[in-house]
Image: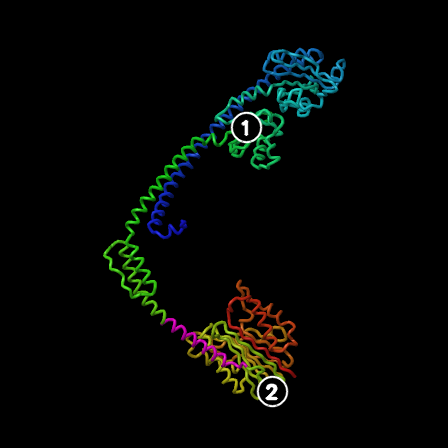
Amino acid sequence: MKNPRDYIRTSLSRRLSIIIVLMASIFFLGSLGFLFVESRKAVREEALNGAAQVLDNTVQRVNVLMQRVEIASDNFMWLPLRHLDVADSMFVYSRRILTCNPDLNGCSIAFEPNYFPDKGHYFSAYTLNDNGKFDTTQEGNPSYDYHYMDWYQAPKLLDEPVWIEPFADFNPEDVYAEEIIASYCRPMKDSKGRYVGTFSTDISMEWISKTISEVKPYPNSYCIMIGQSGTFFVHPDTTKLLRESIFTPTLEHPDTALTNLGHAMQRGETGVRKLVFEGKESYVFYKPLGITGWSVAMVCPESDIFGGYMRLYKIVIFIVIVGLILMRLAFSRIIKRELKPLNTLAQQAETIASGQFDKTLPRDNRIDEIGKLTHSFSDMQHSLVNYISELKRTTAVKASIESELKVASDIQMGMIPRVFPPFPERQDIDLYALMTPAKVVGGDLYDYFLQNERLYFCVGDVSGKGIPAAMFMAITRDLFRIIAQQNRSPWEIATMMNNFLVKDNDQSMFVTMFIGMVDLPKGRLEYCNCGHNVPILDGKFLEMGSTNQPLGLWECKAFEGEVIEDIRNRQLLVYTDGLNEAENDRQDRLGDERLLEAMQGTEQLSSEEVIHRLQVVVNNHRAGAEPNDDLTLLCLSIRK
């Protein structure tokens, strides 16, 4: 089976038709995508607003029902408070409130321990509404110590009316058979403001559940109600009532979104969240319920909200895909017919690509893009012939230049002394030098020679790099030799060299240089530093009493020099800035501190060992980076 990628690549007509269809697809799908996104937003906004309004109405209806309970309790509580001295009257009052408010499920008027001494420790007048039959009893006893129950303790401790979370009446182990009750409890106080008991009225949650369940903005939407602990009071699945909470699914499968929803409802917040609720992608609208601390939520499956929208979306996408396929087939045929002459042109181009540049292309009188392409191939043929000819000539010139540079490098290196030890017959001179250009040729130099028991030496660094610096270096080295052989002092040598180099120096090139002369019998060092790096003597930078300009910058009447009376058995290192300014890939320089650290402990090393040690230090610091400057080192030690 042919690879689909090869199938597309081997035909220009296929590629063009696919590109056109892709561009059309991008345009159409982009437009449709924008339309559907905006439509989805509108549907979503309308659904959210509608559902939120329905939830507000539902909560309002529940609040009205619960307010009826609160008003009934408030209206009747004055009766027991007025007759706190008549215990048996409480039975009458608890019964009367139910007869006047048949929607109530029960009423309890409970008192503090031993409030009525003749009634004993417990006294709570309780009346139950059993489908219109009223049963009045005294419900307090040791097995039912109401003094420690939530419905009694909450209003006492909070000193205000409270709603107690629903409970299963009488039999909490069988919530499916027993009725779920919610209680509204008020604290009772005597005329002196002392707490005497709790006035409690009960309402069946089935009444509230029916009110909530009637609300269904979508076929599969439903409402739930939870308490402050998250326990379900109202739920279409009655097996979950009082047995499960909104957090129950997270015990086995942690769900951050569901946990956050539960906490938001516990905090009494109002809002809407999208999450997977009980196995379905849903929008959950939630709102607190009055002063109860409970929360009502309406669960609307996303499939219900966007069901009609998604059906329309799929139909439109199907129509677009079929249309694009038909468009692609039509364009492929048309383009293939129009581009048929390109096959002939491609065969001729292969002939030229094989190296037959003089092969004549067929004449084409077309004036469209294909005709222009044919003429362009012909022009390319002539250009290739000219280019190859020019390339051969350039390659020959480059090879010649590289050869000349190699010769120039050999000549430059031949100008400086490279035989070590330089004076094998002299045991009192330990001298070693090294020069490494950054390019093929460089602008650093060093030189030395022995004349009349005097050792003349120098180290210099010409401005710039490459061939111009190398030529200036050759002139400088020859000047040093010629003038120094006249038994001049280092400062006289520097003065005469500077005055010569300044003349006709149109390029403003200059050279920094350290010139020294050692009187070997005395060990006396005379030197002149012309803007050069400060040498290192015995592991420390040499203290310079005078400063001079580099050679070649401008005329100077006389350079100043200095003298060290005896340098015997002392180690002198002269170098160019290619040492202390050596850089790695991060452009971090070696620096003077690292240089001095490298020179520590070299007192007993020979000059050659010192130079090789510094080479290793520089290479390690560069870590493979290209040299940024020429490197020249000269180490000298005069022995007694």
Q: Could you tell me residue 374's position as x and y percent?
A: 28, 58
Give the residues drawn in magenta, as a range.
393-418
Identified by mark 1, the residue type is Ala
Indicate whether residue 406 is drawn in magenta. yes
**Colour mapping:** rainbow
Drawn side of residue 140 relative to residue 289, left or right: right
Q: Quadrant of residue 529?
A: bottom right
For residue 63, above or below residue 560: above
The answer to which of marks 2 and 1 sits earlier in the sequence is: 1
Q: Quadrant of the C terminus?
A: bottom right
Task: Name the residue carrying label 1.
Answer: 297
Residue at image coords 31%, 44%: 330
Find disc 2 in the rendering and name its residue.
425
Residue most extreme to the front: 1
- Amino acid at pointer 2: Glu
Instruction: Pinpoint residue 19: horizontal percent, then vertical percent.
Output: 36, 48
Above or below, 569 relative to 616:
below
